[in-house]
Image (cartoon, rainbow, N blue to C red):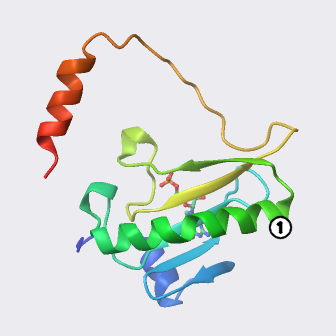
Amino acid sequence: MSDESTIFDAILAGDIPCHRVYEDDHVLAFLDIGPLSRGHVLVIPKERARFMHELSEASAAAIGSVLPKLCRAVMAATGCAHYNLLQNNGAPAHQAVFHVHVHIIPKFDDGSGLGIEWNSGELDDGAAMAGAIADAIE
Ligand code: 5GP
């Protein structure tokens, strides 16, 4: 468990209010206070972990198992047909709150939602890179 307390700990403790949409033993989901679009939801583990690579498999599984129904609920409530899931790790990767969270961000025809700059390159070391990653899996 991380030593670093964040605003999400205060939300989990009920010390700071949120617009809660879902809760179980391992997961809390609530509206983002600065939504990129209507219905922007944050899904967080109750376990305190800064980054995805530090999260327990149990918490990761708990989040993963509720995401489909939360996405369906966001679609039903907002009428969106499209959405992005976003999960930032590290300040350079746009993480501002250092407690793992998954964004569910509806994308609407008016353009509201997540803006993405996708600077794709060439895959020129695929075999070596895939091998290196595969070998690094614990
Ligand atoms: P990150 O950039 O870390 O992936 O996103 C953190 C998100 O947390 C931001 O979208 C921000 O609006 C949201 N956020 C930060 N503080 C609060 C808060 O006190 N309440 C709620 N509901 N959302 C928050």
Q: Quadrant of ligand 1?
A: bottom right
Q: Quadrant of residue 5?
A: bottom left
Residue 121: image location, x then y, percent: 42, 13
Does 110 appear above or below 123? below
The kind of residue on which mark 1 rests is Ala
Q: Is residue 11 left or right of residue 122?
A: right
Residue 12 percent coordinates (x, y)? 48, 83
The residue that label 1 is drawn on is 77
Q: Residue shown at 69%/59% (left/top)?
A: 40
Using the image as rendered, state which of residue 55 and residue 73 is in the foreground. 73
Indicate the secondary structure of the residue bearing disc 1: helix
Percent across and percent down for residue 44 are 48, 70
- Residue 122 lies, in percent from the top left, at 39, 10
Density class for disc 1 (Cα within 10 Å; few <14, some 14-19, many ≥20) is few
The one of 14 and 44 positioned closer to us in this rendering: 44
The reply to whether residue 95 is visible in this rendering is yes
Question: Is residue 122 depicted above or below 127 in this figure?
Answer: above
Residue 18 seen in the current view: no
**Rendered-image quadrant of the N terminus:** bottom left
Residue ID at (58%, 25%): 117
**Residue found 27% across the figure and 55% down from its top:** 53
Q: How many marks?
A: 1
Within the image, what quadrant is residue 66 found in? bottom right
- Residue located at (70% from left, 56% from top): 35
Which residue is at the front of the view, 21 or 138?
138
